[in-house]
Amino acid sequence: MGREAKIANDLFYVCSVIEQIGRDTKNRRADVVGLLGEKEITRILDLADVLHCEPIATTAAELTQKQRIVDGDFDNVANCKYTVPKVFDIAKVYKRLIVSVAGEREISPVAALIEIYSSWVSGKIDDYNSSMYFENPQYLYESYLAGEPLRE
């Protein structure tokens, strides 16, 4: 009562790890998801309640090494002209969208996660100079369904 579902909390953790890896390695979040792969994302999701005990940065560093994720050239933090959103702020945006899409389309959370991070919306959320990451969840969901931002 009053708490979000376990799966939503676990998805929040997975999205936080993806965001941290992306920032640490300067990779697009879609690329991080691709490099982790469905099997590893599923494993992280399954173990999220245990992995929560470790700092996000520790888990991200271990996964970066394990999956051999090399540095890229996408530095949305350095390119941000405004206040950089926190890792957890971005993770929350993704988590909400994943929960909405998975529930509405009746697909697994991992399938929704991969779909969303692989779509156009990921590039918009990861552009910290745009307003997309701080739009309300319903607007973001409706834009995602429309295949483009409903307004710019």
Image (spheres, helix red, strand yellow):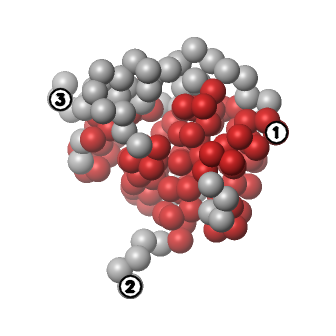
Label 2 – label 3 distance at C-alpha: 36 Å
x 36%, y 33%: residue:
84
Residue 133 in the image, given as x and y percentages of width and height:
32, 38
Q: Residue furthest top?
A: 73
In the structure shown, which secondary structural element does the residue marked by tag 1 occupy?
helix
Per the image, the residue denoted by label 2 is: 1
Quarter of the image that includes the C terminus: top left
Tell me the amino acid under the disc marked 3. Answer: Arg
Q: Residue at x 40, y 76 (%)?
A: 3
- In the rendered view, tell whether residue 31 sits above or below residue 116: above
Task: Measuring from the top left, give residue 87's x and y in whole percent.
Answer: 46, 43
Q: Separation of disc 2 and disc 1 at Cα?
A: 38 Å
Spatial CA distance of label 1 from label 3 is 40 Å
- Please, what secondary structure does the residue beneath circle 3 have? loop
Give me the residue at 67% from left, 43% from top.
60
Indicate the secondary structure of the residue bearing disc 2: loop
Side of 78 relative to 26 (left or right):
left
Task: Judge depth for marks 2 and 1 and give the one in front.
Answer: 1
Q: Is residue 116 left or right of residue 49?
A: left
Q: Quadrant of residue 96?
A: bottom left
Would residue 105 be found to the left or right of residue 107 on screen? left
Amino acid type of the residue that numbered disc 1 sits on in the rendered structure: Lys
For disc 2, the neighbor class at 10 Å (few under 14, some 14 to 19, many from 20) is few
- Of mark 2 and mark 3, the one earlier in the sequence is 2
- Neighbor class of circle 1 (other Cα within 10 Å; few <14, some 14-19, many 20+) is few
Q: Earlier in the sequence, mark 2 or mark 1?
A: 2
Above or below residue 21? Residue 81 is above
Q: Mark 3 — residue?
A: 151
Q: Is residue 111 visible?
A: no
* Viewer-proximal residue among 23 and 141: 23
Task: Name the amino acid, label 2.
Answer: Met
